[in-house]
Image: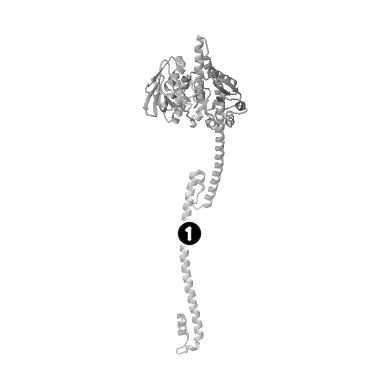
Amino acid sequence: MTVHPILERQIRKYLPEGFDIDLLQPFLQAVNSRYESQERDKQLSEHAFAISEREYQDVYQNLKEQNEISRQSVEKLKCALSKLDQRFSANYDDASDLMRVVNDITTLAEQTRILKIELESAKESAEQLAKAKGNFLSVMSHEIRTPLNAIIGNIHLLEGEPYLQEQESLLRSLRISSHSLLSLINDILDFSKIDEGKVSFNERNMSLSEILHNLREAHSFKAMENRNKVQVWFDASIPPNLIGDESRLNQIMNNLIGNAIKFTQNGTISIAASLVANNPRDARVRFSVTDTGIGIENSKQSLIFERFTQANSDIDRKYGGSGLGLTIVKRLLELWGSKIELQSEPGQGSTFQFELEFRKGTSASQRLTKAAGGDLSGLRILVVEDTEYNVKVAERMLTHWKATVDVAVNGQVAVDKCKTSTYDAILMDIQMPVMDGITATRTIRMFNQQVPIIAVSASAAEVHDDVVAAGMSDSVAKPFNPHDFFDVVFKWTRTGT
């Protein structure tokens, strides 16, 4: 049999030479088997140890790598936390202080959560404030423009009545002063909407030549006070019928002309319009207002377009003004896709220029007042208005144009009248007690889709979407120009448009 090496050495050492080994065969086999079993166990143990050693080395190496990654991660977290909040930078002495970093992250997360809640609360408060501000401006617009509508309306009515020659200058002064007041009120009440870009442009047929000459007439009285001459230069090649927002153009030009007159003494104010481009469907026109007044230093020219800002405090004290006019001009032109340009030298005067593009109208789109001759005879019109003096203004204008007028003091009365009577047009105020104009219009539209309903309100522009959604045909804002007022009524009663 094969004998284990250890057993073989022991046999040679302890058994005499010539000993019959077969006598011990069973014993030797058992011992040999034991030795072989121990050898196998030893080999298995050595193999297992070698594997364990390799696994230990792998685990140890992985642990070192993980520890380095952990160290680098903690270091990066420390740097990030230190950048977010300097209070955390002094707390770290050991880069392995993971628990402290985790605690700081937890603290920062909690602070972030609280800040988020505070920001959401601030956002809600800001939205509520903006809504309250919008409501306030809407109410102020209605409350200020409503009586101003009566003032301007009555001035127009007085000018249409016989008066003494010496009263002409008084009426002209009232008219110009009322329009100056209206311009200032428009600037103040419209400023928030303009600043936020929430301005709509209502395009209508217009004549630029007529607009510029009306502007000269409107500012002539104030110009005479400063001993200024106002002249208009109009490019005859400009198409006579253009489509644009006459009201916004007037607002821009009024601010520029008013400024030119205010800062000029014994000088000249030149208003000009020249054709830049004439295409089949549109025309581009360059407007300019030039004065020979005090001028503006180059370093101060950008400042005058900032809100509530004059070139210097002496100007504010000497000439007054809200400091909003040029800001509104700049923002309106930007919203219109244009920009204001300024050239000025101290003591040499200033020139403000801008360009606008208008779609072309047709010969049939001339101002309706001219074609109509102020005749609304045969028409029955319902005036829905809760303010008595505004009722009287609208009523006198309409009867002057030979229309028959009926009156409703609120929306509910208007609805009841429309159920029993037929009207050619309804002039609907927006803000009224009992039932407002929007609700009244929706109610009337449930049983009458044909009658033109025209919004006549100090807030008409602000509720334009509601006006359209309610089913109104058109709108005219208070205080309205009698010519515009007539044109809108004529449009929906005589032309069938």
Q: Residue at x 50, y 87 (%)?
A: 24
Between residue 250 and residue 268, name the one nearer to us. Answer: 250
> What amino acid is at disc 1?
Leu
Between residue 199 and residue 114, name the one nearer to us. Answer: 199
Q: Which residue is drawn at 45% across and 14% down?
A: 224
Considering only vertical position in the picture, is 161 above or below 465?
above
Give percent across and percent down for residue 118. 56, 40
Q: Is residue 72 visible?
A: yes
Give percent across and percent down for residue 318. 47, 19
Considering only vertical position in the picture, is 20 above or below 373?
below
The residue at the far top in this view is 165
What element does badge 1 sit on?
A: helix
Give percent across and percent down for residue 26. 51, 85
Q: Count up the numbered dots.
A: 1
Colour logic? one colour
The 10 Å Cα crowd at callout 1, few under 14, some 14 to 19, many 20 or more, is few
Give percent across and percent down for residue 110. 56, 45
Q: Can residue 311 be seen in this view?
A: no
Pointer 1: what residue? 63
